[in-house]
């Protein structure tokens, strides 16, 4: 049985994860699923069910990163019958693991330690989770293919894929994009008094304008991902001067409709946005000394 303190921390980590997933669904994210519109054969309800199914795996003390990933995907598959959150789970599991160990102000260095400890068993479990989720556009890899037995630790395997997968890049870089773009953007917007869902919309747009979406690249090619990045840049450039992301709603909805009509879903960008929301909550909770109000604010 987990120690009471670890179980209590786990409950707060699980609550922070659920809150991050739910806020991201409230955010208007062009091309992705959100409260304003479904898309790509999926609805908000599908993602809410996935968040609820996967949260216990983030909240359980002592699982380890690989087990968190595999159990979260198994539970999601049982609840929804489809892949709705593989990227979110791959990003959230190391953050959750670090949150169990971190002291105030030390989420990033603790995360780096967690990533450095990832071993062959973590890789085997993550590979199994990816095979189970069977994400769209999953192709063959000349080294460390997920359809073959793992031969190196999970961080090393992810580092091999960093140039073609932005989630793998987070494992290699210590989640640099999540913190330097995502969490920084959220904090900027929240300091301006923006509602958290609109702060998430702004953060999503900044990711979209800065980084070619690797989910789009897998399905449609690198040129399509770069074209999408350029399409997002004018809207992202207008965000800060207007002072209120909600004022861009008509333009965001127009881009949303156009991308969905083209079948383009920036799924990796949405996954990075959830990870940034989760990381920001964990940082704030640790800074608040793990008070319940700090975890839930």
Image (cartoon, rainbow, N blue to C red):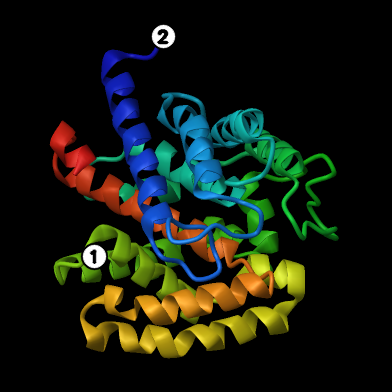
Q: Residue at x 28, y 14 (%)?
A: 4
Q: Residue at x 66, y 40 (%)?
A: 126
Question: Dot 2, crowdedness within 10 Å: few (<14), some or many (≥20)?
Answer: few
**Element type at mark 2:** loop
52 up-or-down from 42: above or below: above
Where residue 106 appears, as percent x and y from the top left, is 27, 48
Q: Is residue 159 left or right of residue 60?
A: right
Front-most of residues 272 and 47: 47
178 up-or-down from 154: above or below: below
Q: Is residue 142 visible?
A: yes
Where residue 41 appears, as percent x and y from the top left, is 66, 54
Circle 1 residue: 187
Q: Is residue 114 visible?
A: no
Q: Residue at x 18, y 35 (%)?
A: 290
Where residue 63 appears, as percent x and y from the top left, is 50, 26
Question: Dot 1, crowdedness within 10 Å: few (<14), some or many (≥20)?
Answer: some
**Quadrant of the snapshot with the N terminus:** top left
Circle nearer the N terminus (1, 2) = 2
Q: Which mark is residue 28?
A: none
Name the outermost residue toward the top: 1
Where residue 32 appears, as percent x and y from the top left, is 54, 63
214 up-or-down from 288: above or below: below
Front-most of residues 145 and 272: 272
Q: In the picture, residue 183 is in which quadrant? A: bottom left
**Element type at mark 1:** helix
Circle 2 residue: 1
């Amino acid at each position: 049985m987990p120690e009471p303190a670890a179980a209590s921390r786990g409950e707060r980590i699980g609550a922070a994860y659920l809150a991050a997933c739910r806020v991201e669904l409230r955010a208007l994210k062009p091309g992705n699923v959100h409260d304003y519109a479904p898309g790509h054969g999926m609805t908000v309800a599908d993602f809410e069910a996935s968040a609820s199914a996967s949260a216990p795996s983030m909240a359980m003390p002592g699982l380890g990163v690989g087990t968190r990933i595999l159990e979260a995907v198994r539970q999601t598959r049982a609840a929804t019958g489809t892949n709705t959150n593989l990227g979110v789970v791959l990003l959230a599991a190391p953050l959750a693991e670090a949150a169990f160990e971190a002291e105030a102000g030390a989420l990033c260095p603790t995360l780096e330690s967690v990533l450095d400890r990832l071993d062959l068993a973590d890789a085997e479990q993550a590979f199994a989770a990816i095979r189970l989720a069977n994400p769209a556009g999953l192709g063959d890899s000349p080294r460390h293919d997920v359809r073959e037995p793992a031969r190196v630790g999970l961080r090393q395997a992810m580092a091999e894929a960093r140039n073609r997968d932005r989630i793998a890049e987070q494992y290699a870089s210590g989640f640099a994009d999540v913190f330097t773009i995502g969490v920084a953007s959220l904090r900027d917007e929240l300091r301006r008094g923006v509602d958290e869902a609109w702060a998430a919309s702004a953060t999503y747009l900044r990711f979209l304008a800065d980084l070619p979406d690797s989910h789009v690249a897998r399905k449609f090619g690198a040129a399509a991902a770069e074209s999408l990045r350029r399409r997002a840049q004018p809207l992202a450039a207008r965000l800060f001067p207007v002072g209120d992301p909600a004022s861009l709603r008509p333009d965001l909805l127009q881009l949303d409709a156009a991308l969905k009509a083209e079948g383009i879903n920036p799924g990796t960008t949405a996954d990075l946005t959830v990870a940034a929301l989760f990381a920001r909550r964990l940082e704030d909770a640790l800074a608040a000394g793990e008070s319940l109000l700090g975890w839930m604010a």
